[in-house]
Amino acid sequence: MPQTTDKDACELLDADHLAVKHLFVEYARLAMATPSGSAAERKALATKICNELTVHAQIEEEIFYPALRGAVPDAADVVDEGLQEHQDAKDLIARIRGMGQADDAMDKLVSELARSIEHHVKEERDELFPKAKAAPRMDLAGLGAQLRDRQQELQAGLRA
Ligand SMILES: [Fe+2]
Ligand SMILES: [Fe+2]
């Protein structure tokens, strides 16, 4: 049976974007609702957000961005900008991971990360994905499978 439910590259990456957006909303809800009682839950959620974003950025950098750069010469600028935004996010993630427990300072950093990711995701949706979809040399289905395999591998490594 053909696996028609397999996501192509853009669908897979956008599903990740949506999933992490939900995690940010959940974090903000916890931070607002019960400032002191939910510290352990917020810490666990912050760790999950950091892990998911790290894996997501890594599969984009290893697979999707190079493919786009190779197939679409005029995508170089947006890819470079994307890499810079990944670096900014990684710096915030490192600071969040370095914090012992969830407190006001962590809440501020997580909300800063949420804003930064929201901006970055918008650029991927509005600029990168349309270029990828318009490029005849981009095998979005094949890239989707590669992204999924690498994502599963990295996620298994996190659980090990
Ligand atoms: Fe992304
Ligand atoms: Fe990205």
Image (cartoon, rainbow, N blue to C red):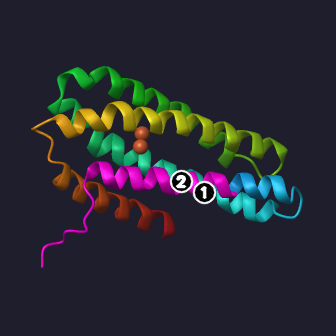
Identify the residue shown where x is 35% and y is 63%. 153
> Per the image, is 19 magenta?
yes
Residue 136 occupies quadrant: top left
Report the amino acid beneath label 1: Leu
> Per the image, is 70 magenta?
no
Quadrant where the N terminus sits is bottom left
Q: CA distance from mark 1 to mark 2?
A: 5 Å
Ligand 1 visible in quadrant? top left
Which residue is tagged 1?
Answer: 23
Q: Visible in this render: residue 135?
A: yes
Identify the residue shown where x is 86% and y is 60%. 34
Contact between marks 1 and 2 (CB within 8 A): the answer is: yes
Q: Nearer the viewer, residue 109 or 131?
A: 131
Q: Is residue 142 left or right of residue 60?
A: left
Q: Is residue 65 above or below residue 47?
A: above
Q: Nearer the viewer, residue 119 or 66?
A: 119
For label 1, count other residues whose C-alpha is less than 10 Å away and answer few (under 14), some (14-19) or many (20+).
some
- Asked if the residue at label 1 sits under 8 Å from ligand 1, the reply is no
**Residue 101 percent location from the top left of the image:** 79, 54
Identify the residue shown where x is 54% and y is 31%. 88
Q: Visible in this render: residue 101?
A: no
**Residue 95 percent location from the top left of the image:** 67, 40
Residue 155 occupies quadrant: bottom left
Q: Range of the magenta residues?
A: 1-26
Which residue is tagged 2?
Answer: 20
Which residue is situated farthest in the right direction here? 36
Q: Nearer the viewer, residue 130 or 84?
A: 130
Q: Is residue 107 above or below residue 76?
A: below
**Residue 8 percent location from the top left of the image:** 25, 55
Report the amino acid beneath label 2: Val
